[in-house]
Amino acid sequence: MAGFFKKKTVDDVIKEQTKELRGTQRQITRDRSSLEKQEKQLEMEIKKMAKTGNKEACTILAKQLVQLRRQKNRSYAVGSKVTSMSSQTKLMNSQMKMAGAMATTTKVRVDRWAASFHRGV
């Protein structure tokens, strides 16, 4: 029961966020690959319709192709933002650990100085 009420440490939170960001990145990659497959299929259908001379179907499919490419570009933008968030999280974690180490070092130095000061008095 005590595990349920235990407060999460910063490292635990960072691990969870990193895990979620990696999962999101994988999902974006999967979506992007399916969009690329759809794009290839649309291109083949456009070529097929162009051979038969069906201009109306070609224009409709071309519009769909343009929308699909826009969606693919948006997925690249989202992927780069997720990567950026992951990098920022790692940077903040390392800076926080460095600040903690510096605080510990400063405290040790002050304690040593105070001890040597009191011995000298």
Image (spheres, grey):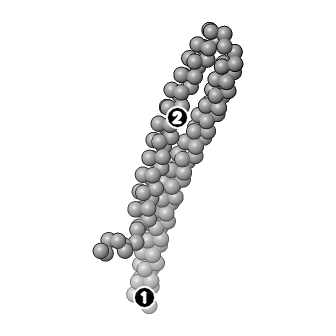
Q: What SS does tag 2 mark?
A: helix
Q: Nearer the viewer, residue 39 or 78?
A: 39
Compared with residue 50, is residue 101 higher up or lower down, i.e. above or below? below
Is residue 109 in view? no
- Classify the position of the C terminus by image quarter: bottom left
What residue sits right under mark 1 in the picture?
A: 118
How many marks can you see?
2
Circle 1 packing at 10 Å, graded few (<14), some (14-19), many (20+), is: few
Q: Are marks 1 and 2 in contact (CB under 8 Å)?
A: no
| First of labels 1, 2 by sequence position | 2
- Decide if residue 79 is on the left or right side of residue 8: right
- Could you give the CA–CA distance between mark 1 and mark 2, rounded to whole angstroms? 67 Å
Mark 1 or 2: the one toward you: 2
Residue in the foreground of this view, choosing between 53 and 34 = 53
Give the class, few, some or many, for how many residues have Cα within 10 Å of label 2's Cα (few <14, many ≥20).
some
Name the residue at 54% across, 22% down: 41
Q: Extreme bottom residue here?
A: 121
Point 46% across, 56% down: residue: 17
Q: Of residues 2 and 37, which is closer to you in this image?
A: 37
Label 1 sits on what residue type? Answer: His
Q: Which mark is residue 32?
A: 2
- 3 to 27, vertically: above or below: below
Q: In percent of the image, x 51 and y 55: which residue is there?
A: 89
* Quadrant that contains the N terminus: bottom left
Position of residue 67 measured from the top left corner of the image (x, y, whole percent):
65, 32
**In the rendering, at what x and y percent does residue 3 appear?**
32, 71
Q: Quadrant of residue 107?
A: bottom left
From the top left corner, tell me how far across and down residue 113 is, in percent: 45, 79
Q: Which type of secondary structure does the marked residue at label 1 adopt?
A: helix
20 lies left or right of 48: left
